[in-house]
Image (spheres, rainbow, N blue to C red):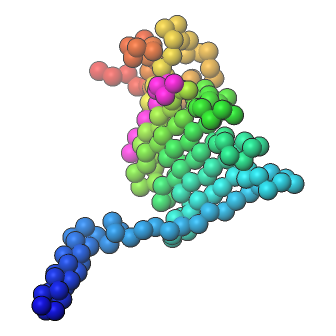
Amino acid sequence: MGMGKIEIKCSHIAIVLLTILVLGIESWAVSVGYDEFDYWEGTKTVRACRRYDSEAHLRQKLYYWKDGVTLQQEERYDLEGNTVVKIHYNADGKMQTNVDGWAAMRARYEDKRPVVESFYGEDGKLVARKIYNSSGRLVVRQMVGDQDFDPYEQFEAQPMMGERVLYYDRSGQLKGSAGGYRQE
């Protein structure tokens, strides 16, 4: 009877070990990192928090309003240190448009080079996108705005040499383009 219990335990251990080998140890490891805090001057209220993973990679930065509880800005990083998410919040904790005209940004990188950056408004809808070529050079800027979007209304909307800027209305219809190389 004692042998049966030992065999069951051994078989369970064997299954767990086999699963770890098949799935990889990372899927079973729990990453226990640490946080570093900055405080508003003269208080014990949190102003900022930097979160690190178990291997000391910065993974997230959180900035708080004076109450020390409500987020003002959140930034997330990949293992190479690239900013992959950035979100701005108002004092009520809702997404808020920043001075650049967006409330949230998501980015994707390959080999430390940017591939695409997407920018969103307070409503969570896409307002702009930047697309990069394989060498990391900005080649397309897509702008989403009202039907009468003027490409010369904003300085940053001016195309650089070789860059193509596409303008869309809120329904996603292409309204025009500027710059870029002539396509045949």
- The residue sitting at the bottom extreme is 2
| Left or right of 59 in this view: 66 | right
**Total numbered badges shown on the rendered structure:** 0
- The residue sitting at the right extreme is 42
| Left or right of 36 in this view: 147 | left
In percent of width and height, residue 104 lies at: 54, 35
In percent of width and height, residue 52 lies at: 56, 63
Residue at 58% x, 32% y is: 95
Taking depth in this image into account, of 86 and 135 the one nearest to the observer is 86
In percent of width and height, residue 165 lies at: 47, 23
Taking depth in this image into account, of 158 and 68 the one nearest to the observer is 68
Check the picture and name the quadrant holding the N terminus: bottom left
Residue at 52% x, 7% y is: 148
Q: Which span of residues is magenta-colored?
A: 123-135
Residue at 62% x, 20% y is: 154
Query: Could you tell me if residue 163 is visible in this image?
Result: no
Assess whether residue 161 is covered by the magenta stretch: no
Query: Could you tell me if residue 9 is visible in this image?
Result: yes
For residue 171, what is the image quadrant? top left
In percent of width and height, residue 127 lies at: 50, 24
Taking depth in this image into account, of 130 and 147 the one nearest to the observer is 147
- The residue sitting at the top extreme is 148
| Left or right of 40 in this view: 158 | left
Work out whether 154 lies above or below 119: above
Residue at 60% x, 32% y is: 94
For residue 29, what is the image quadrant? bottom left
Work out whether 18 lies above or below 135: below
Check the picture and name the quadrant holding the C terminus: top left
